[in-house]
Amino acid sequence: MLRLKTLHSRTFDRLRALFTNRAMPLFKILIDRTTSFFHSRFANGEPLRFKTLRSTIIVSFLGLFTLVQILTFYSVYTISTREVRTGIYNDLAGGLGVIDLKLKSRAENLSTAAEVLSRDYSFKTVFASRHRPTLLSAMKNQATRIQADVMLLVSLKGMVIEDTAHPGARPTAFPLPNFFTDAGKTDVASTTAYLDDKLYHLTAVPLRAPLPVAWIVFGFKIDDTLARELKMLTALDVTFTADRPGQAPAIAASSLSGELRDQISAALRSSGREPDGTMTFVLNDEQYLGMSHDLSTKDGAQIKVLMQRSMAAALKPYYRIRRILVLLFIGGVAVTLILGVVVSSFVTKPVRVLVEGARIIEQGDYTRTLPVLRQDEIGSLTSAFNHMQTAIAEREERIGHQAFYDALTDLPNRSFLDQKLQEAISKAREENRPLALILLNINRFISVIATLGHETGNAVLLKISVLLRDSMPPSAIVARMGGDVFALMVPGEDDNGALRIVNDIATRLEAPIWVEGAPIQIEARFGIVTYPVHGDDANTLQRRAEVALHLARSTAHGFAVYSPDQDRHSIHHLTLLSELRHAIDNDELVLHYQPKIHFASRRIIGVEALIRWRHPQHGFIPPDDFIPLSEGTGLIKPVTFWALKTAIRHCAQLFEQGIHLNVAINLSARVLPDHQLPDAIASFIDEFQLSPLQISLEITESAIMIDRQRTLEVITRLDSLGVQMVIDDFGTGYSSLAYLKNLPIDEIKIDKSFVQKMDVNENDAMIVRSIIELGHNLGYKVTAEGVETDRIYEMLRERGCDVSQGYLHGKAMPLEELMVWLEQSPWGRKRPAG
Ligand code: C2E
Ligand code: CA
Ligand code: CA
């Protein structure tokens, strides 16, 4: 049990050492080589990447398998080599031990025999007789008995007395004189030495009678026979080598024969020594492991006994294992490849399905859902994928819808109409049929929002959109173009058909629209164009429909069919705007002044400054054509500031000439919130040294309703300058009295739409009367604009109106003309000075 444990832990230690010492560096080399290989293949230095998951899996499989195989092979290789080595080492060490033992036992046998002989009385007698033939014969007998190859008697002085190898020879000196010194001490000595060029194992004992009288020396030949005998004992080849001083090294004896025996000297010379004392050398192209042992000598020679064993022969059983491993590796690679292909296709199939799905989505197709065939992560990934796909599809539809439909009314928008109009024109061309395009604009929608708020405004727009849809044939398209403008595209209708439709809608709009229990009266304007009469492409038709809508403003019935001679209105807004930038600097803008008449004195008390643009190419452009435009850009600010400064300068000029007139300047809703406005006005008044009382600022009723809080602040600030604050176009907005009461207002101006027809329209006359009363109640001065006839003038005077403005007194005119008018008009005589 304990043995087993130590064996195991030893194997483990060995393996660990193997890994840390050999395997790890080997790995590093392997990895370095592989990387540098790929680097040289992909010279741009990019790391190796596999294009598909499949190849990654297969290559990983193969790589892992190969790694394991290499490790296994390496382990088997090193362990087997080590095992074999250790085995051989043990055998060699054991073999040498056996030889040592054998030689020792021989020496012992000899010494015992020699001692027996030295006590042999008859032999001593023969020795004493000095009869050489008898002595020789006795010696031979003795040698044969103990199987020695040679026996010598040596005198104490070191002279050979008798030698069985040379019977009767003349006494000579024994070649190893100091051999006997050891024997003298221990009574027995042993060595290896050459006698007559033959290697012997010699043993010497003294011959006593009773004191030593001579040395008995027995010798055993160390020859091939002995070597073979030893080989039989040890199962190892045994070789004795001799290196005598002054002689070439030689093989004294060997169990090897023939070629091997001839080669061994040379092999030994080039052998390498291992730390464990073994040596390696090559014999006959085979690797051998050997071990040698020095035999004792007395004559300076070096005698070695060498044993060796072939590594290849010992490794033979392991070669089989290695071969099996290689075969296993080849087979394994094939199996791994097949497995890799099968597993990877099994694993990657659902992924490939997903990839395919993603590709389809990429092409914009969201209709195909992927089948969820599995319960695992891939399965949940697939269903997540499907959900994502529906979510994308929904969102895309939503976005698509938003792109083509108006969010509030869900009507098609401008983009949608652009597209459909082009298609409809093509179709109409094919079918040789007309097509009508009608633009609809709600009058004064801004005042609806200002009075009732955005929510009500939206509700109104929604109701109108429903009304429009209901009054259209199914083939028509009703679109919201933005704000309060709608478009109706009606295939198959010409001018007459379009007019019929417009009439129908206008009639429907006569009934008020009810929002939250309140009736709201809506009026609309219509611009009409038809294909092919007014154009044969979408752009032209749309542009001309806008021109027609613009024209509809100035018609009594609220609609206009496009006519080419009025197309001057279609001057492109954008170029106009860009030119407006330069108009101020180029003195193209001028102010005209319209007189304001005091009812009580029937004399002029002030003027309203009205802006004009004398365009070098287009001629006269009315303010209604560019002021609203400039309000959409930042241009309204310089225009207003210019008008303010010019009007105040003119006012100062008149004052210097003794003409004391108030000048009213219009302020757009867009400049009202400007923080610089009050300061600018103050600085102009200051610059021209006017009384602020001579300046009136006209703000439309709808403008003050847009942002009540802000307007209150601004008007309060402007009023604090001392100027007169006027509410313009009064009656068109829906301002509440309660609100107006809080404003620092000096004057209200009744909108001309009530004034112009008050002589024929009782309703208007009633409104005008109540505005005058209301204004007076609140302490305002009341002005009426649009006074064109004496009759209206009289009506207003009777109702107590304070100031009259209108064509009856004079149109807006340039300053020079005003000077003439002041002199010549019955309304215009200068107030008596002082
Ligand atoms: P508004 O402030 O209501 O100006 C009165 C408009 O009525 C003027 O048109 C004037 O010529 C016209 N008018 C005056 N008396 C009569 C009449 O008896 N009968 C008729 N049918 N019309 C009459 P105009 O000059 O075309 O100005 C139009 C609008 O342009 C103005 O309306 C005003 O809102 C704006 N506007 C004019 N000048 C300026 C300005 O300097 N700055 C700003 N922000 N807006 C201006
Ligand atoms: Ca005005
Ligand atoms: Ca007005």
Image (cartoon, rainbow, N blue to C red):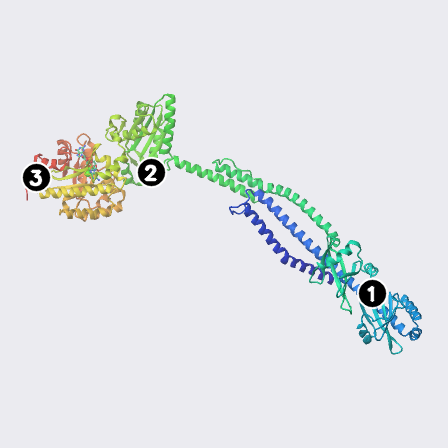
Q: Label 3, label 1: how many angstroms apart (C-alpha)? A: 174 Å
The answer as to whether callout 3 falls within 8 Å of ligand 1 is no
Local crowd size for mark 3, using a 10 Å CA cut-off: few (<14), some (14–19), many (≥20): some
Name the residue that disc number 2 marks: 458
Q: Is residue 763 left or right of residue 391?
A: left
Q: Do the CB atoms of the residues marked 2 and 3 lie less than 8 Å apart?
A: no
Look at the numbered disc 1 and give the secondary structure of its residue: loop
Q: Position of residue 609 (x, y in %)?
A: 17, 39
Local crowd size for mark 1, using a 10 Å CA cut-off: few (<14), some (14–19), many (≥20): few
Look at the numbered disc 3 and give the secondary structure of its residue: loop
Which of the two labelled residues, at mark 2 and mark 3, occupies the earlier sequence position? 2
Q: Is residue 627 above or below residue 81?
A: above
Q: Label 2, label 3: how many angstroms apart (C-alpha)? A: 52 Å
Of the residues shown, which amino acid type is indicated by label 1?
Answer: Asp
Is 364 in front, or is 17?
17
Name the residue that disc number 3 marks: 830
Q: Is residue 17 above or below residue 721?
A: below
Mark seen at residue 680 = none
Is 732 in front, or is 137?
137
Local crowd size for mark 2, using a 10 Å CA cut-off: few (<14), some (14–19), many (≥20): some
Of the residues shown, which amino acid type is indicated by label 3?
Answer: Lys
- Please identify, in this view, whether the residue under mark 2 or under mark 1 is nearer the observer: 1
Which of the two labelled residues, at mark 2 and mark 1, occupies the earlier sequence position? 1
The answer as to whether callout 2 falls within 8 Å of ligand 1 is no
Which of the two labelled residues, at mark 3 and mark 1, occupies the earlier sequence position? 1
Mark seen at residue 196 = 1
Of the residues shown, which amino acid type is indicated by label 2?
Answer: Asn
Q: Label 2, label 1: how many angstroms apart (C-alpha)? A: 139 Å
